[in-house]
């Protein structure tokens, strides 16, 4: 929170004093709140944590010192400035011993009090900044345990997640199959601190007639077969996160309704006109190019822009081969624990094959390979196609790697040699030679 957003709470039972103080702070550009008793002050402090509290020590219900003690149980770093009677030295000493930020003796010049408050606010802003950084660091460490990888792409992904997790911003996750879209959505929810549920809905897995009632819920009698009231997924995710998986396959008719919910933050169950308020963070995932789909009229552009406030792009595994080893070791460990098997030794040649593989099924495919490896049944399955391929020489491994990268570039560019050469950053003639040498035809 920036310093300008931190409010000053003034507590005094004398209305003239209260008004005078608030005005002095407002002239200094601060937002203020006022309370005339300890109880009222505590209520305000609990509902909207102010930046600094200035309180008279003599109050009608309890004294300022007991307010100070109570504030310290809410947030011990919240600066409290007490206003004491003239010449009350013993009290002033006690105030400072009790952990007040400062005290100001009556009578005082308003400028003096404004100055003390200014310093206290600076300190408060710094405390909050340090706290926010510490939170982010803690989130990032937790994310490191869940999202494995040390490639630049994954590092960036974890940083972004930690940065945006506690905002309201809708997130669009883009990535091929098995790249970890659902995992990332889950991590976003976990790091958001939202107390509601994580609710996932697969927009492609339901017939059109059911998507609507799944999402919005329905009242009894809304349609034939609707005998009881049903709470929809959006409502179920209230206070939490709604994960719209395969959002590209959401029927157009449902897209309009979802857009309305996002705009108005309320929904109507099928068969009802009552607006139910909803507060859920929307995370959507897709493998498709939604901009292209919108241009082709197969996805609503307005919904796309609503959903795509933050974009998280999950790189395919073949573009971050440096993560393969780490991921494989991680999944082998998990699998061993699950099957109660001792960890088998991983021969370096195996890593070469793993690294050279194309991984069209991405991390999910790698996870399956690790499972088979732990169970000792990996031979005959890619990337361990044959038994004798397990021991590659360096030139063989280099060939395998080259072959994988070239085949991948060709596939991605529809077998167009010129485009593949550009993507691989080599001249077209070199690509041609390599393909001949590696026995890669243009089939
Ligand atoms: N970086 C990663 N670290 C650890 N596990 C991962 C990582 N990425 C993916 N996984 C794991 O791989 C598997 C596939 O991930 P997930 O289901 O999230 O992929 P997806 O993108 O939703 O796939 P699909 O598009 O097919 O639904 C899961 O078991 C997930 O936990
Ligand atoms: Mg998924």
Image (cartoon, rainbow, N blue to C red):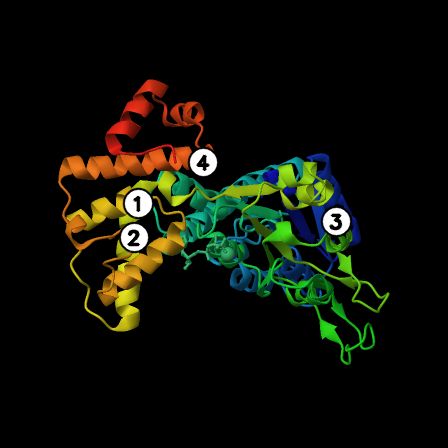
In the image, 34 versus 360, the foreground residue is: 360
Which quadrant of the figure contains the N terminus? Answer: top right
Between marks 3 and 4, how big is the CA–CA gap?
73 Å
Q: In which quarter of the image is residue 429?
A: top left
Q: Mark 3 points at which residue?
A: 17
Disc ID at residue 382 = 2
Badge 4 or badge 1: first in the primary sequence: 1
Give the percent coordinates (x, y) of residue 218: 77, 71
Q: Mark 1 points at which residue?
A: 357
Q: Mark 4 points at which residue?
A: 412
Q: Is residue 141 visible?
A: no
Q: Residue at x 19, y 64 (%)?
A: 343
Q: Mark 2: few, some, or many residues within 10 Å (few <14, many ≥20)?
A: some
Q: Residue at x 27, y 42 (%)?
A: 356
Asked if the residues shown at circle 2 and circle 3 are in contact, with their CB atoms under 8 angstroms apart, the answer is no
Asked if the residues shown at circle 4 and circle 1 are in contact, with their CB atoms under 8 angstroms apart, the answer is no
Between marks 2 and 3, how big is the CA–CA gap?
80 Å
Give the percent coordinates (x, y) of residue 246: 58, 53
Mark 3 or 1, which is nearer the eye?
A: 1
Badge 2 or badge 3: first in the primary sequence: 3
On whether ligand 1 comes within 8 Å of the CB at mark 4, the answer is: no
Badge 3 or badge 1: first in the primary sequence: 3
């Amino acid at each position: 929170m920036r310093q300008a957003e931190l409010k000053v709470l003034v507590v005094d039972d004398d209305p003239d004093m209260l008004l005078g103080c608030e005005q002095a702070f407002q002239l200094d550009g601060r937002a203020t709140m006022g309370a005339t008793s300890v109880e009222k002050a505590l209520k305000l402090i609990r509902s909207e944590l102010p930046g600094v509290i200035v309180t008279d020590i003599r109050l009608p219900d309890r004294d300022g010192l007991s307010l100070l003690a109570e504030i310290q149980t809410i947030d011990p770093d919240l600066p409290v400035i007490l206003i004491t009677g003239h010449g009350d030295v013993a009290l002033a000493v006690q105030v400072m011993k009790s952990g007040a930020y400062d005290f100001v003796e009556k009578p005082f010049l308003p400028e003096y009090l404004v100055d003390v408050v200014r310093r206290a606010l600076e300190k408060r802003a710094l405390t909050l900044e340090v706290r926010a950084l510490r939170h982010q660091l803690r989130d990032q460490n937790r994310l490191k345990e869940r999202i494995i990888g040390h490639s630049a792409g994954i590092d960036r992904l974890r940083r972004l997640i930690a940065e945006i997790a506690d905002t309201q911003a809708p997130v669009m996750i883009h990535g091929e199959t098995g790249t970890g879209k659902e995992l990332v959505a889950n991590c976003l929810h976990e790091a958001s601190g939202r107390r509601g549920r994580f609710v996932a809905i697969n927009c492609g897995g339901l017939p059109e007639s059911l998507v609507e009632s799944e999402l919005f819920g329905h009242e009894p009698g809304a349609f034939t077969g609707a005998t009881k009231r049903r709470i929809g997924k959006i409502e179920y995710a209230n206070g939490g996160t709604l994960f719209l998986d395969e959002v590209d396959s959401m029927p157009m008719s449902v897209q309009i309704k979802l857009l309305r919910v996002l705009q108005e933050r309320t929904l109507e169950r099928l068969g009802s006109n009552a607006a139910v308020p909803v507060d859920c963070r929307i995370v959507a995932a897709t493998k498709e190019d939604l901009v292209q789909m919108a241009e082709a009229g197969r996805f609503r552009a307005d919904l796309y822009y609503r959903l795509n406030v933050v974009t998280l792009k999950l790189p395919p595994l073949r573009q971050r081969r440096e993560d393969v080893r780490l991921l494989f070791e991680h999944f082998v460990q998990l699998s061993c624990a699950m099957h109660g098997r001792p960890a088998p030794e991983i021969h370096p040649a195996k890593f070469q094959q793993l690294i050279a593989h194309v991984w069209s099924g991405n991390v999910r495919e790698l996870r399956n390979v690790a499972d088979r490896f732990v169970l000792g049944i990996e031979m005959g399955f890619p990337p361990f196609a044959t038994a004798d391929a397990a021991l590659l020489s360096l030139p063989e491994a280099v060939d395998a790697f080259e072959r994988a990268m070239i085949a991948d570039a060709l596939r991605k560019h529809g077998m167009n040699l010129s485009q593949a050469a550009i993507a691989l950053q080599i001249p077209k003639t070199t690509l041609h030679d390599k393909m001949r040498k590696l026995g890669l035809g243009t089939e």
